[in-house]
Image (cartoon, rainbow, N blue to C red):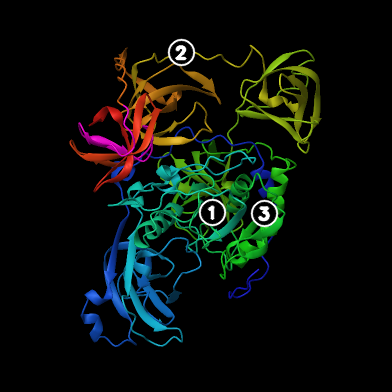
Amino acid sequence: MTTHDEKPATSGATLDRRIILKASAAVAAMAIVGTEAPRPATAQTAETIAETWVEEDNAFRAAESLGDPFTLETAFPFYAVGAHWSGEVGFPVLVELAFSADGTTFTDPVIVSAQEEDAGRPDRNGRYYADLTFTGGTRFVRYRTLDGDGQPAAVAGFAMTYIDASPGPSVDMVFAAALAPSVARPPIISRAAWGANEAYRYDQNGEIWPPEYRTVEHVIIHHTETTNFQDPLIALRSIYYYHAVTRGWGDIGYNYLVDYMGNVYEGRVGGENVIGGHAYQYAEGSSGIGTIGSFAFVDTTPEAQTGIVWITSYAARNLDPLATKPFQQVPNVPTICAHRDVVQTSCPGDQLYGDLPTIRQYAAAIIDGGANPAPPPSVAVGSVVATIVTDANLRTSPAIGSSVKARLPLGTRLTITDGPATNGGYTWYQVQTPANGLGWVASITFGVPTSTPTPPVAGAFRAGDPVSVATDSLNLRSAPTVGASVIIVMPSGTVGTVLAGPRNADGYDWYQVQTAQATGWCVGTFLAPEGGSTPPPTTGAFPVGASVAVTSDALNLRAQPSSSATVLARLPRATVLTVTGASRVATGYTWYPVNSSQFGSGWVAGEFIALTSQSPAPTPSPTPPAGTYPLGTVLVTTSDVNLRAGPNLGRSVVAVLPTNTRVEVTSVAQLADGYRWYGVFAAGYGGGWCVADFLAV
């Protein structure tokens, strides 16, 4: 293990046992109804704004004394800034930065230097790049350039890129914080959901950094060295822009990222085993997990630690998390290691580094199937709660020191939209209020309204009764206890026969059930009489072809008929949809397959849509099969056509290609959503996917 130069911190608290319980519990249902409708500009056209200021382009700078700080007023408020300079500078460079909203009162200065330990891609023009420094939407930056001894020095090619990544989705618009077991793939927040602009991955020559693959042998934990408790999506989009555009990599370097609420985000494009750019050559054969924040002197939240355990268990599910073995040039590297274990760096900070032994133990317990799952949470995203105190504070962020938006009367009904986030000794949830919009409240200020469902009485099933699984998935265990090993995971609708029970243990009534796959014990709460209380699939109230509209402020369009399925898009109120097939009943809702000309195809909960007219919309005529084009074929577009990030209607639009745009076929055809798709490249627009119907030789 390499040494590090950070000031040693006092030993942080070890991970709470709740971390492993959360990380091994059944997947919590995601929100059906969103919180607030995305603003059109944010949802469709919002884009990160950035500008690079070059010192040598401003002659007046040369006349300034090098010892005096220079103040730059930027063209727009920014949230992150990165300093960079010529690769030909022959001495260590330090840059002193201070920030101000009004140009008068400045923050204490911070010192940054060249960031070299995260490299994995060649930096643009061989330049040196410092870490991003994050601010709160300021307009002024004051700086000095120094040599390694702290003396003022002229630095050739000095420049600063300042970034405003606030346009785009905010953290309250995405939901995936995990209470998941697991070695199953977690509900990772996609690049499209967090606002990745896929055009950044291309230049005039095509894709800058095409995916390459190597089987994962290690998981490397990082911190992003960004501000704690800021909007993580602003941090994520800023890092993406800085890596992909400013540094010229063509993508973000981390494979996954985790925020303070336990949300896990998709990083580098390409999926599992894709090589990232986060630890020089050690990115090859590893999965790099960036924990959003700075953890040199403060620890991560329990929720963030849960997310780390969760994604680590998934990424290392085929490995021994407690083992060590040689990796590249370093002998005996732990399977789950820190950035500092392979590169000379202080990352991921002393506090998070101190958590790694426990993270390894938890991951081992999950991978081995021996972890006890937690009981179902009393509240989750989508739950309706009510205040139980007078004048409960609704705050702007999950912290006692944050601003109070409103004081909520006793009995105010709230909808949970995000969380939990533990901070300052309290557990916080983001909520939607009737009159004051979104905000954060401490969990001690609310409770679940009465009329919550009660567990079934003992003896609800008898030996010989036919039953079926009435939830998304249910563990069949070797004994009637949550500590027993899992034999199989039964999907919704699995049919079996009760052999014995009930037996009460761990607060549940357990039944021994025989299925076609195995025999074991499961919790009776999640069983239903076969042919009894579970409603059969139905064509429902909306016929195929019906034109319907969204009746809630925002509605999740999902990939499958389930509240835990991937969210493809957030549909604003009044979005018009066409029902394309029969409904299905699952996870307590009636789901309809729908299509939107703007958002693509997917499934929505029928409780939040209504007919726009009593007449079914006309069924679209089938699309004729398109021609087959070999790689390298040059085609032209026959009309304006969307260039998408992937081969389906749910992927984000990278660009709109005008009629008669010349494109070159770069990927073989794929069929999805009833269309044939081709990967293409268009000069001036970059790469992506188009429907073949709008292409011709």
Residue 158 image point, x, y percent: 32, 75
Which amino acid, by three-letter code, is at mark 3?
A: Ile
Which amino acid, by three-letter code, is at mark 2?
A: Thr
For this rendering, which residue is in front, 396 or 517?
517
Residue 238 image point, x, y percent: 39, 57
Q: Which residue is mark 3?
A: 359
Q: Which residue is mark 1?
A: 260
Highlighted range, magenta: 628-653
Mark 3: secondary structure? helix
Whether residues under marks 2 and 3 lie with C-beta atoms below 8 angstroms apart, the answer is no
Q: CA distance from mark 2 to mark 3?
A: 47 Å
Q: Earlier in the sequence, mark 2 or mark 3?
A: 3
Q: On screen, 391 above or below 123?
A: above
Q: CA distance from mark 2 to mark 1?
A: 42 Å
433 to the left or right of 185: left
660 to the left or right of 275: left
Please say whether residue 645 is one of the residues in the magenta stretch.
Answer: yes
Q: Earlier in the sequence, mark 3 or mark 1?
A: 1
